[in-house]
Amino acid sequence: NNTSNFKVIKVKADRFDLPADEFPKEWYNILPDLPEPLPPPKDPEEGPSRLEFLNNVMIKTCLKQEMSDQRWIKIPEELRELYIHAGRPRPLYRALRLERKLGLKHVRIYYKREDLSPTGSHKVNTALAQAYFAAKEGITTLVTETGAGQWGTALSYATRMMDLDCVVFWVKSVYKWKVDRRTFMKLYGAKVYASPSKETSIGRRILRKNPDHPGSLGIAISEGLEYASKLDSAVYCLGSVLNHVLIHQTIVGLETMKQFELADDKPDLIVACLGGGSNFGGMTLPFIGRVLKGKLECEFLAAQSWAAPNLIKGEYRYDFGDVAEYTPLLKMYTLGHKVEMPPIKADGLRYHGAAPVISLLRHHGYIKAIAYPIDEKIVFEAARLFIEAEGWIPAPESSYAIRAAIDKALEYERKKEEKVICINISGHGFLDIPAYREKLFE
Protein backbone atom coordinates (compact mmCIF):
# COMPACT_ATOMS: atom_id res chain seq x y z
CA ASN A 1 0.00 0.00 0.00
CA ASN A 2 1.15 3.54 -0.81
CA THR A 3 1.26 5.47 2.48
CA SER A 4 3.43 8.36 1.30
CA ASN A 5 0.53 10.83 1.63
CA PHE A 6 -0.11 9.96 5.26
CA LYS A 7 1.62 11.62 8.21
CA VAL A 8 2.68 9.14 10.89
CA ILE A 9 2.08 10.41 14.43
CA LYS A 10 3.72 8.62 17.31
CA VAL A 11 1.28 8.42 20.23
CA LYS A 12 2.58 8.01 23.76
CA ALA A 13 0.47 5.86 26.09
CA ASP A 14 -1.28 8.08 28.63
CA ARG A 15 -3.76 5.66 30.21
CA PHE A 16 -3.11 3.15 33.00
CA ASP A 17 -5.72 0.44 33.60
CA LEU A 18 -6.08 -2.35 36.10
CA PRO A 19 -7.82 -5.61 35.19
CA ALA A 20 -11.02 -6.38 37.08
CA ASP A 21 -9.36 -9.14 39.08
CA GLU A 22 -7.03 -6.54 40.62
CA PHE A 23 -9.90 -4.50 42.00
CA PRO A 24 -9.40 -4.20 45.81
CA LYS A 25 -10.88 -6.93 47.97
CA GLU A 26 -10.77 -4.72 51.09
CA TRP A 27 -11.40 -1.09 52.01
CA TYR A 28 -8.74 0.81 53.95
CA ASN A 29 -9.68 2.29 57.34
CA ILE A 30 -7.15 4.90 58.47
CA LEU A 31 -8.37 5.08 62.09
CA PRO A 32 -5.71 2.64 63.48
CA ASP A 33 -2.96 4.69 61.78
CA LEU A 34 -4.01 8.21 62.82
CA PRO A 35 -1.53 10.29 64.87
CA GLU A 36 -4.10 10.34 67.70
CA PRO A 37 -7.44 8.58 68.29
CA LEU A 38 -10.34 10.09 66.37
CA PRO A 39 -12.54 12.07 68.80
CA PRO A 40 -15.83 10.14 68.92
CA PRO A 41 -19.23 11.68 68.15
CA LYS A 42 -21.04 12.73 71.31
CA ASP A 43 -24.37 13.97 72.61
CA PRO A 44 -24.93 17.63 73.52
CA GLU A 45 -25.42 18.47 77.19
CA GLU A 46 -29.15 19.04 76.74
CA GLY A 47 -31.95 17.39 74.81
CA PRO A 48 -32.56 13.82 73.62
CA SER A 49 -29.70 11.50 72.70
CA ARG A 50 -28.58 12.15 69.14
CA LEU A 51 -26.40 9.04 69.24
CA GLU A 52 -29.45 6.92 69.96
CA PHE A 53 -31.40 8.74 67.24
CA LEU A 54 -28.65 8.07 64.70
CA ASN A 55 -28.54 4.41 65.71
CA ASN A 56 -32.27 4.19 64.92
CA VAL A 57 -32.16 5.89 61.51
CA MET A 58 -28.92 4.69 59.89
CA ILE A 59 -27.61 1.40 58.49
CA LYS A 60 -26.27 -0.74 61.34
CA THR A 61 -23.36 -2.18 59.34
CA CYS A 62 -22.21 1.32 58.38
CA LEU A 63 -22.40 2.52 61.98
CA LYS A 64 -20.27 -0.47 63.02
CA GLN A 65 -17.69 0.53 60.38
CA GLU A 66 -17.74 4.15 61.58
CA MET A 67 -15.47 3.62 64.60
CA SER A 68 -13.97 0.27 63.61
CA ASP A 69 -10.41 -0.44 64.75
CA GLN A 70 -9.82 -2.79 61.79
CA ARG A 71 -7.29 -1.41 59.30
CA TRP A 72 -8.72 -3.50 56.45
CA ILE A 73 -12.45 -4.19 56.02
CA LYS A 74 -13.47 -6.95 53.64
CA ILE A 75 -15.63 -5.97 50.65
CA PRO A 76 -18.38 -8.63 50.26
CA GLU A 77 -17.96 -10.55 47.00
CA GLU A 78 -21.48 -9.64 45.79
CA LEU A 79 -20.63 -5.98 46.31
CA ARG A 80 -17.31 -6.36 44.46
CA GLU A 81 -19.32 -7.71 41.53
CA LEU A 82 -21.58 -4.66 41.68
CA TYR A 83 -18.53 -2.38 41.67
CA ILE A 84 -17.09 -4.15 38.65
CA HIS A 85 -20.49 -4.02 36.92
CA ALA A 86 -20.40 -0.25 37.53
CA GLY A 87 -17.08 0.00 35.68
CA ARG A 88 -14.38 -0.37 38.30
CA PRO A 89 -11.41 -0.23 38.29
CA ARG A 90 -11.36 3.27 36.76
CA PRO A 91 -8.40 4.52 34.70
CA LEU A 92 -5.57 6.82 35.71
CA TYR A 93 -4.45 9.20 32.97
CA ARG A 94 -1.24 11.10 32.35
CA ALA A 95 -2.35 14.60 31.28
CA LEU A 96 0.19 14.89 28.46
CA ARG A 97 -1.89 17.35 26.45
CA LEU A 98 -2.51 19.57 29.46
CA GLU A 99 1.20 19.48 30.25
CA ARG A 100 1.99 20.63 26.70
CA LYS A 101 -0.65 23.37 26.85
CA LEU A 102 0.86 24.67 30.09
CA GLY A 103 4.41 24.41 28.72
CA LEU A 104 5.52 22.06 31.50
CA LYS A 105 8.99 20.56 31.31
CA HIS A 106 9.62 19.69 34.96
CA VAL A 107 6.11 18.78 36.16
CA ARG A 108 4.04 15.72 35.32
CA ILE A 109 0.27 15.69 35.88
CA TYR A 110 -1.96 12.64 36.30
CA TYR A 111 -5.70 12.45 36.95
CA LYS A 112 -8.09 9.75 38.13
CA ARG A 113 -11.36 9.57 36.18
CA GLU A 114 -14.12 9.01 38.71
CA ASP A 115 -16.57 10.53 36.22
CA LEU A 116 -16.76 7.17 34.43
CA SER A 117 -19.39 5.75 36.78
CA PRO A 118 -22.98 5.10 35.65
CA THR A 119 -24.12 8.38 37.19
CA GLY A 120 -20.98 10.40 36.50
CA SER A 121 -19.21 10.64 39.85
CA HIS A 122 -17.29 8.90 42.64
CA LYS A 123 -20.43 8.91 44.82
CA VAL A 124 -21.46 5.52 43.44
CA ASN A 125 -18.63 3.94 45.49
CA THR A 126 -20.41 4.47 48.81
CA ALA A 127 -23.94 4.46 47.37
CA LEU A 128 -23.60 0.84 46.26
CA ALA A 129 -22.10 -0.17 49.61
CA GLN A 130 -24.84 1.53 51.63
CA ALA A 131 -27.64 0.15 49.45
CA TYR A 132 -26.12 -3.33 49.64
CA PHE A 133 -25.86 -3.32 53.44
CA ALA A 134 -29.34 -1.80 53.80
CA ALA A 135 -30.87 -4.53 51.66
CA LYS A 136 -29.10 -7.19 53.75
CA GLU A 137 -30.66 -5.63 56.86
CA GLY A 138 -34.17 -5.79 55.36
CA ILE A 139 -34.49 -2.05 54.75
CA THR A 140 -36.79 -1.03 51.88
CA THR A 141 -36.34 2.77 51.59
CA LEU A 142 -33.21 4.94 51.59
CA VAL A 143 -33.57 8.66 52.32
CA THR A 144 -30.87 11.23 51.70
CA GLU A 145 -29.86 14.80 50.90
CA THR A 146 -27.89 16.13 47.96
CA GLY A 147 -26.14 19.39 47.06
CA ALA A 148 -24.80 19.29 43.51
CA GLY A 149 -27.06 16.32 42.80
CA GLN A 150 -24.26 13.78 42.24
CA TRP A 151 -24.91 11.98 45.53
CA GLY A 152 -28.68 11.94 45.06
CA THR A 153 -28.24 10.46 41.60
CA ALA A 154 -25.75 7.86 42.85
CA LEU A 155 -28.02 6.67 45.64
CA SER A 156 -30.99 6.60 43.24
CA TYR A 157 -28.93 4.33 40.98
CA ALA A 158 -27.77 2.11 43.84
CA THR A 159 -31.27 1.63 45.22
CA ARG A 160 -32.45 0.56 41.77
CA MET A 161 -29.60 -1.99 41.58
CA MET A 162 -30.78 -3.42 44.93
CA ASP A 163 -34.53 -3.05 44.18
CA LEU A 164 -35.08 -0.47 46.96
CA ASP A 165 -36.95 2.86 47.09
CA CYS A 166 -35.18 6.22 47.30
CA VAL A 167 -36.20 9.68 48.57
CA VAL A 168 -33.92 12.68 47.94
CA PHE A 169 -34.02 16.15 49.52
CA TRP A 170 -32.17 18.44 47.12
CA VAL A 171 -30.84 21.91 47.94
CA LYS A 172 -33.42 24.18 46.29
CA SER A 173 -31.05 26.58 44.54
CA VAL A 174 -29.55 23.64 42.60
CA TYR A 175 -32.83 21.72 42.20
CA LYS A 176 -34.15 24.68 40.21
CA TRP A 177 -31.41 24.89 37.59
CA LYS A 178 -30.35 21.25 37.25
CA VAL A 179 -33.58 20.08 35.64
CA ASP A 180 -31.94 17.28 33.67
CA ARG A 181 -30.23 15.80 36.72
CA ARG A 182 -33.59 15.81 38.47
CA THR A 183 -34.94 13.81 35.52
CA PHE A 184 -31.96 11.46 35.83
CA MET A 185 -32.86 10.67 39.46
CA LYS A 186 -36.50 10.11 38.53
CA LEU A 187 -35.46 7.69 35.79
CA TYR A 188 -34.10 5.53 38.62
CA GLY A 189 -37.46 5.84 40.37
CA ALA A 190 -36.46 8.31 43.09
CA LYS A 191 -38.80 10.82 44.73
CA VAL A 192 -37.05 14.20 44.70
CA TYR A 193 -38.03 17.19 46.86
CA ALA A 194 -36.60 20.71 46.74
CA SER A 195 -35.17 21.56 50.17
CA PRO A 196 -36.37 23.30 52.27
CA SER A 197 -39.64 21.48 51.57
CA LYS A 198 -43.11 21.18 53.05
CA GLU A 199 -42.47 17.46 53.71
CA THR A 200 -40.84 18.02 57.13
CA SER A 201 -41.37 20.22 60.17
CA ILE A 202 -37.90 21.80 59.85
CA GLY A 203 -38.56 22.54 56.18
CA ARG A 204 -41.93 24.14 56.89
CA ARG A 205 -40.42 26.22 59.70
CA ILE A 206 -37.70 27.60 57.43
CA LEU A 207 -40.18 28.32 54.62
CA ARG A 208 -42.44 30.28 56.99
CA LYS A 209 -39.51 32.58 57.77
CA ASN A 210 -38.28 32.78 54.16
CA PRO A 211 -40.40 31.25 51.36
CA ASP A 212 -37.50 31.85 48.93
CA HIS A 213 -34.77 30.24 51.03
CA PRO A 214 -32.15 28.77 48.63
CA GLY A 215 -31.47 25.82 50.94
CA SER A 216 -28.22 24.24 52.08
CA LEU A 217 -26.78 20.80 52.71
CA GLY A 218 -27.23 21.33 56.45
CA ILE A 219 -30.97 21.89 55.95
CA ALA A 220 -31.33 19.01 53.49
CA ILE A 221 -29.58 16.66 55.94
CA SER A 222 -32.05 17.69 58.67
CA GLU A 223 -34.98 17.02 56.36
CA GLY A 224 -33.63 13.63 55.32
CA LEU A 225 -33.07 12.56 58.93
CA GLU A 226 -36.51 13.71 60.04
CA TYR A 227 -38.27 12.11 57.07
CA ALA A 228 -36.48 8.79 57.51
CA SER A 229 -37.29 8.69 61.22
CA LYS A 230 -41.01 8.82 60.44
CA LEU A 231 -41.03 5.98 57.89
CA ASP A 232 -41.19 2.26 58.60
CA SER A 233 -38.30 0.22 57.17
CA ALA A 234 -36.42 3.35 56.10
CA VAL A 235 -32.91 4.59 56.87
CA TYR A 236 -31.02 7.79 56.26
CA CYS A 237 -27.85 7.61 54.12
CA LEU A 238 -25.12 10.25 54.10
CA GLY A 239 -22.87 10.75 51.08
CA SER A 240 -19.90 12.41 52.77
CA VAL A 241 -18.32 13.47 56.11
CA LEU A 242 -18.70 10.26 58.14
CA ASN A 243 -15.86 7.74 58.34
CA HIS A 244 -17.75 4.80 56.83
CA VAL A 245 -18.30 6.89 53.69
CA LEU A 246 -14.59 7.68 53.45
CA ILE A 247 -13.77 4.00 54.02
CA HIS A 248 -15.95 2.99 51.04
CA GLN A 249 -14.28 5.66 48.89
CA THR A 250 -10.73 4.40 49.57
CA ILE A 251 -11.03 2.07 46.59
CA VAL A 252 -10.15 5.19 44.56
CA GLY A 253 -6.78 5.69 46.25
CA LEU A 254 -6.04 1.96 46.44
CA GLU A 255 -6.53 1.59 42.68
CA THR A 256 -4.43 4.70 42.04
CA MET A 257 -1.51 3.31 44.05
CA LYS A 258 -1.36 0.23 41.79
CA GLN A 259 -1.71 2.39 38.68
CA PHE A 260 1.24 4.57 39.67
CA GLU A 261 3.26 1.36 39.88
CA LEU A 262 2.20 0.60 36.30
CA ALA A 263 3.30 4.11 35.31
CA ASP A 264 6.60 3.61 37.17
CA ASP A 265 6.00 6.92 38.93
CA LYS A 266 4.78 8.29 42.25
CA PRO A 267 2.92 11.46 43.30
CA ASP A 268 4.53 14.37 45.15
CA LEU A 269 1.20 16.20 45.48
CA ILE A 270 -2.38 14.91 45.42
CA VAL A 271 -5.15 17.45 44.83
CA ALA A 272 -8.92 17.05 45.17
CA CYS A 273 -11.85 19.35 45.81
CA LEU A 274 -13.39 19.30 49.29
CA GLY A 275 -16.83 20.10 50.64
CA GLY A 276 -17.47 17.42 53.24
CA GLY A 277 -14.51 15.27 52.20
CA SER A 278 -15.65 12.09 50.42
CA ASN A 279 -13.73 12.31 47.14
CA PHE A 280 -10.74 13.97 48.81
CA GLY A 281 -10.60 11.28 51.49
CA GLY A 282 -11.20 8.45 49.06
CA MET A 283 -8.20 9.41 47.00
CA THR A 284 -5.81 10.61 49.71
CA LEU A 285 -6.33 8.41 52.78
CA PRO A 286 -4.52 5.32 51.44
CA PHE A 287 -1.57 7.56 50.50
CA ILE A 288 -1.71 9.44 53.82
CA GLY A 289 -1.61 6.08 55.59
CA ARG A 290 1.72 5.37 53.87
CA VAL A 291 3.00 8.84 54.79
CA LEU A 292 2.08 8.21 58.44
CA LYS A 293 4.10 4.99 58.34
CA GLY A 294 7.12 6.72 56.79
CA LYS A 295 6.78 4.80 53.51
CA LEU A 296 5.99 7.76 51.24
CA GLU A 297 6.72 11.47 50.94
CA CYS A 298 3.71 13.27 49.51
CA GLU A 299 1.67 16.44 50.12
CA PHE A 300 -2.11 16.78 50.00
CA LEU A 301 -4.09 19.84 48.92
CA ALA A 302 -7.84 20.41 49.32
CA ALA A 303 -9.43 22.86 46.87
CA GLN A 304 -12.40 24.76 48.31
CA SER A 305 -14.75 27.68 47.65
CA TRP A 306 -14.75 30.87 49.71
CA ALA A 307 -18.50 30.19 50.00
CA ALA A 308 -17.63 27.42 52.48
CA PRO A 309 -13.91 27.37 53.35
CA ASN A 310 -14.34 25.07 56.34
CA LEU A 311 -10.68 23.93 56.44
CA ILE A 312 -9.42 27.51 56.16
CA LYS A 313 -11.83 29.70 58.13
CA GLY A 314 -13.46 26.99 60.26
CA GLU A 315 -12.74 26.28 63.93
CA TYR A 316 -11.66 22.81 65.04
CA ARG A 317 -14.36 21.97 67.58
CA TYR A 318 -17.47 19.92 68.18
CA ASP A 319 -20.50 20.96 66.12
CA PHE A 320 -23.72 19.54 64.72
CA GLY A 321 -23.72 18.19 61.18
CA ASP A 322 -27.11 19.70 60.33
CA VAL A 323 -29.19 22.83 60.90
CA ALA A 324 -31.92 21.21 63.03
CA GLU A 325 -29.34 19.59 65.35
CA TYR A 326 -30.55 16.03 64.79
CA THR A 327 -27.02 14.65 64.40
CA PRO A 328 -24.58 13.99 67.24
CA LEU A 329 -21.80 16.52 67.79
CA LEU A 330 -18.77 15.85 65.59
CA LYS A 331 -15.21 17.11 66.17
CA MET A 332 -14.39 18.86 62.91
CA TYR A 333 -13.38 22.08 61.24
CA THR A 334 -16.67 23.95 61.07
CA LEU A 335 -18.00 27.34 60.04
CA GLY A 336 -20.97 26.79 62.36
CA HIS A 337 -23.97 24.61 61.50
CA LYS A 338 -26.31 27.60 61.05
CA VAL A 339 -23.98 29.72 58.91
CA GLU A 340 -25.51 31.29 55.79
CA MET A 341 -23.52 30.35 52.67
CA PRO A 342 -24.14 31.91 49.23
CA PRO A 343 -25.19 29.49 46.46
CA ILE A 344 -22.50 28.59 43.92
CA LYS A 345 -22.49 26.39 40.84
CA ALA A 346 -20.18 23.89 42.56
CA ASP A 347 -22.76 23.40 45.29
CA GLY A 348 -21.27 20.09 46.39
CA LEU A 349 -18.55 22.17 48.09
CA ARG A 350 -21.02 24.30 50.08
CA TYR A 351 -21.06 22.58 53.48
CA HIS A 352 -20.21 24.05 56.86
CA GLY A 353 -18.07 21.19 58.19
CA ALA A 354 -15.26 18.92 57.02
CA ALA A 355 -15.11 15.18 57.75
CA PRO A 356 -13.76 14.48 61.27
CA VAL A 357 -10.98 12.25 59.85
CA ILE A 358 -9.93 14.94 57.36
CA SER A 359 -10.17 17.57 60.09
CA LEU A 360 -7.89 15.67 62.46
CA LEU A 361 -5.29 15.22 59.72
CA ARG A 362 -5.57 18.91 58.84
CA HIS A 363 -5.13 19.77 62.53
CA HIS A 364 -1.88 17.77 62.55
CA GLY A 365 -0.60 19.48 59.39
CA TYR A 366 -0.91 16.60 56.93
CA ILE A 367 -3.44 18.42 54.72
CA LYS A 368 -3.24 21.89 53.20
CA ALA A 369 -6.15 23.85 51.75
CA ILE A 370 -6.78 26.63 49.26
CA ALA A 371 -10.02 28.46 48.43
CA TYR A 372 -11.19 30.22 45.26
CA PRO A 373 -13.54 33.21 44.83
CA ILE A 374 -17.31 32.81 45.00
CA ASP A 375 -17.79 34.13 41.45
CA GLU A 376 -15.98 30.94 40.29
CA LYS A 377 -14.62 32.68 37.17
CA ILE A 378 -11.04 31.39 37.46
CA VAL A 379 -12.35 27.91 38.30
CA PHE A 380 -14.43 27.66 35.13
CA GLU A 381 -11.55 29.13 33.13
CA ALA A 382 -9.35 26.27 34.38
CA ALA A 383 -12.07 23.80 33.44
CA ARG A 384 -12.23 25.26 29.94
CA LEU A 385 -8.45 24.93 29.57
CA PHE A 386 -8.70 21.30 30.70
CA ILE A 387 -11.51 20.62 28.22
CA GLU A 388 -9.48 22.12 25.37
CA ALA A 389 -6.46 19.99 26.31
CA GLU A 390 -7.89 16.67 27.51
CA GLY A 391 -11.20 16.72 25.64
CA TRP A 392 -13.83 15.98 28.28
CA ILE A 393 -16.00 18.02 30.67
CA PRO A 394 -15.34 17.90 34.44
CA ALA A 395 -17.93 18.75 37.06
CA PRO A 396 -17.75 22.26 38.56
CA GLU A 397 -16.57 20.76 41.88
CA SER A 398 -13.78 18.83 40.15
CA SER A 399 -12.76 22.03 38.37
CA TYR A 400 -11.63 23.46 41.70
CA ALA A 401 -9.09 20.65 41.92
CA ILE A 402 -8.02 21.27 38.33
CA ARG A 403 -7.53 24.98 39.11
CA ALA A 404 -5.44 24.18 42.18
CA ALA A 405 -3.35 21.61 40.29
CA ILE A 406 -2.65 24.02 37.43
CA ASP A 407 -1.64 26.75 39.86
CA LYS A 408 0.74 24.41 41.70
CA ALA A 409 2.15 23.01 38.44
CA LEU A 410 3.00 26.50 37.18
CA GLU A 411 4.51 27.38 40.57
CA TYR A 412 6.74 24.27 40.48
CA GLU A 413 7.64 24.95 36.85
CA ARG A 414 8.78 28.51 37.62
CA LYS A 415 11.08 27.07 40.29
CA LYS A 416 12.21 24.28 37.91
CA GLU A 417 11.19 21.66 40.49
CA GLU A 418 10.69 18.09 39.30
CA LYS A 419 7.23 17.22 40.64
CA VAL A 420 4.37 14.81 40.01
CA ILE A 421 0.82 16.00 40.65
CA CYS A 422 -2.22 13.72 40.80
CA ILE A 423 -5.77 15.10 40.59
CA ASN A 424 -8.87 13.20 41.65
CA ILE A 425 -11.52 14.32 39.19
CA SER A 426 -14.66 13.41 41.07
CA GLY A 427 -17.29 13.74 38.35
CA HIS A 428 -18.30 14.84 34.85
CA GLY A 429 -20.07 18.05 33.90
CA PHE A 430 -22.47 16.86 31.20
CA LEU A 431 -25.45 17.90 33.33
CA ASP A 432 -23.75 21.14 34.38
CA ILE A 433 -23.69 22.72 30.91
CA PRO A 434 -25.97 25.64 32.00
CA ALA A 435 -23.31 26.60 34.56
CA TYR A 436 -20.59 26.55 31.90
CA ARG A 437 -22.75 28.66 29.61
CA GLU A 438 -23.44 31.21 32.34
CA LYS A 439 -19.84 31.46 33.59
CA LEU A 440 -18.02 31.40 30.24
CA PHE A 441 -20.35 32.60 27.48
CA GLU A 442 -22.92 35.02 28.96
Image (cartoon, grey):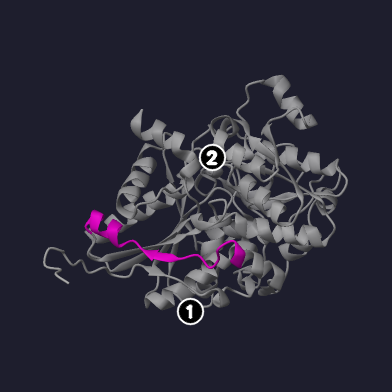
Q: Position of residue 411 (x, y in %)?
A: 28, 56
| Placement of the C terminus among the 4 image quadrants | top left
> Label 1's element?
loop
Using the image as rendered, state which of residue 292 and residue 137 is in the foreground: 137
Q: Is residue 39 visible?
A: no
Seen from this angle, which residue lies furthest front? Answer: 1
Q: Position of residue 324 (x, y in %)?
A: 74, 37
- Image depth: mark 2 or mark 1 in front: 2
Magenta region includes residue 108: no
Within 10 Å of disc 1 (Cα), the crowding (few <14, some 14-19, many 20+) is few
- Give residue 145's quadrant in the image: top right
Using the image as rendered, state which of residue 364 and residue 82 is in the foreground: 82
Within 10 Å of disc 2 (Cα), the crowding (few <14, some 14-19, many 20+) is many
The part of the chain drawn in magenta is 84-103
Residue located beneath label 2 in the image? 347
| Amino acid type, callout 1 | Lys
Which residue shows up at 41% across the image and 77% down it?
262
Which residue shows up at 45% across the image and 71% down it?
17
Q: Position of residue 90 (x, y in %)?
A: 50, 65
| Amino acid type, callout 2 | Asp
Seen from this angle, which residue lies furthest left? Answer: 4
Using the image as rendered, state which of residue 50 and residue 316 is in the foreground: 50
Using the image as rendered, state which of residue 316 and residue 113 is in the foreground: 113
- Give residue 222's quadrant in the image: top right
Mark found first going from the N terminus, 2 or 1: 1
Q: Position of residue 83 (x, y in %)?
A: 62, 65
| Placement of the N terminus among the 4 image quadrants | bottom left
Q: Is residue 394 above or below residue 18?
A: above
Q: Is residue 6 visible?
A: yes
Q: CA distance from mark 2 to mark 1?
A: 36 Å
Magenta region includes residue 97: yes
Residue located beneath label 1 in the image? 295
